[in-house]
């Protein structure tokens, strides 16, 4: 009898310990078929269309692990490892290329160490949060043209901010009456060079309203402190849920150390109707060098999603965008359409 009681006590203690920590495996798998016509326009001739299978048009395909351990007194240890996948043609991936961090969270806020989204990215994402898609192919922000290495170059040809940074320490504050803020800094870890990524944001959430502002600097300096092609990014964004539909939008500016500036304005909307979601996104931008217009462009995306369940969705998406010079001559274009299926687990 005594041995049985001891065994039960041990099991109870181990069960309590296990209850204090957990690991979750999660992921998103997205495949679609369609056509893409993206790239430069040369002498009035645009890129040829390519029929293909895509991975991650509605939502970026990924596999992740996240966990939390209750340390007591309101303090918890957290971690995550998230890797991007190309399910149309899988190849070797760097484990944790999307996120890989460990940290602590409690009444003081949250501290994360490793690879993670920058503090700027939270507000930038807020701008298009009403769209049903989160892929670079269909994002209208920055009037993005092209895929792969060129997908982040919008009006003015300025590289986008980069949504993640490695070697990063990030702090997220608790909410103070709906107001919160975040700070992040990614070290370049290269001798005689300063290529750090620093960002901060401030945000206010109350009911259906969510607004914020953020700034990020992608610095480039040599050992003598001379500035290289440092880029600065500023954004103000907001979203509101009206119940029958959601809207979001904002302003974003990308600026180089040579005084080239690109300003972009974005709006997005989504209307759920039963099992269906109908979504639109539009962006318009203009770049200027020393006050003179160099490029301008716009992009429009539309999508319809049928929710077969809470985890599985069928969808159809299309986007059209182009960028032209100050004289109105088209320089680059993007035309993509696709139909597919996405599943989350």
Image (cartoon, rainbow, N blue to C red):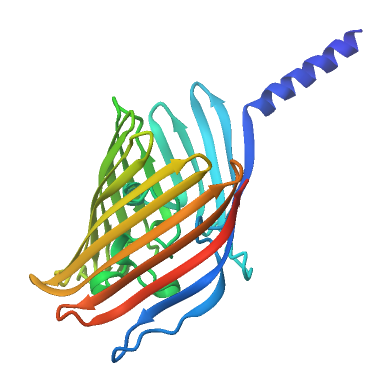
**Is 2 left or right of 116, judged from the image as shown?**
right
Location of residue 53 in the rendering, given as x and y in whole percent from the top left corner: 58, 70
Which quarter of the picture shows residue 46? bottom left
Location of residue 236 in the rendering, given as x and y in whole percent from the top left corner: 23, 48
Q: Is residue 93 above or below residue 81?
A: below
**Is 231 left or right of 58, judged from the image as shown?**
left
Location of residue 45 in the rendering, given as x and y in whole percent from the top left corner: 34, 89
Which residue occupies 78% across, 15% down?
A: 9
Which residue occupies 62% across, 27% down?
A: 20
In this orientation, which residue lies closer to the viewer: 210 or 119? Answer: 210
Q: Is residue 157 above or below residue 177?
A: below
Residue sticking out furthest to the left: 291
Looking at the image, can residue 152 be seen? no
Location of residue 55 in the rendering, given as x and y in whole percent from the top left corner: 56, 64
Which residue occupies 40% across, 77% down?
A: 38
Q: Quadrant of the N terminus?
A: top right
Looking at the image, can residue 267 be seen? yes
Residue sticking out furthest to the front: 273
Residue sticking out furthest to the top: 1
């Amino acid at each position: 009898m005594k041995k049985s009681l001891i065994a039960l006590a041990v099991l109870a203690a181990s069960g309590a310990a296990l209850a204090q920590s957990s690991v979750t495996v999660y992921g998103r798998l997205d495949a679609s078929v369609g056509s893409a016509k993206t790239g430069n326009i040369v002498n009035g001739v645009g890129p040829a269309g390519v029929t293909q299978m895509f991975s991650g048009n509605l939502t970026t395909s990924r596999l992740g692990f996240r966990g939390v351990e209750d340390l007591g007194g309101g303090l918890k240890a957290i971690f995550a490892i998230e890797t991007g996948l190309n399910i149309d043609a899988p190849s070797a991936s760097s484990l944790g290329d999307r996120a890989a961090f460990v940290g602590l969270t409690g009444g003081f806020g949250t501290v994360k160490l490793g690879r993670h989204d920058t503090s700027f990215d939270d507000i930038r994402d807020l701008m298009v949060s009403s769209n049903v898609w989160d892929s670079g192919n269909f994002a209208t922000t920055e009037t993005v043209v092209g895929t792969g290495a060129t997908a982040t170059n919008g009006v003015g040809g300025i590289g986008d901010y980069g949504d993640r940074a490695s070697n990063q320490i990030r702090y997220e504050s608790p909410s103070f009456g709906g107001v919160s803020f975040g700070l992040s800094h990614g070290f370049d870890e290269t001798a005689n060079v300063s290529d750090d990524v620093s960002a901060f944001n401030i945000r206010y959430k109350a009911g259906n309203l969510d607004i914020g502002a953020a700034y990020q600097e992608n610095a480039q300096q040599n050992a003598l402190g001379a500035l290289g092609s440092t880029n600065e990014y500023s954004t103000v964004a907001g979203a509101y849920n009206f119940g029958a539909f959601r809207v979001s939008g904002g302003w974003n500016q990308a600026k180089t150390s040579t005084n080239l500036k690109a300003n972009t304005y974005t709006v997005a909307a989504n209307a759920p109707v039963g099992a269906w979601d109908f979504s639109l996104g539009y962006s318009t931008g203009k770049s200027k060098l020393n006050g003179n217009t160099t490029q301008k462009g716009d992009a429009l995306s539309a999508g319809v999603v049928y929710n077969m369940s809470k985890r599985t969705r069928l969808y159809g998406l299309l986007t059209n965008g182009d960028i032209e010079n100050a004289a109105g001559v088209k320089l680059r274009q993007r035309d993509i359409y696709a139909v597919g299926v996405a599943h989350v687990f």
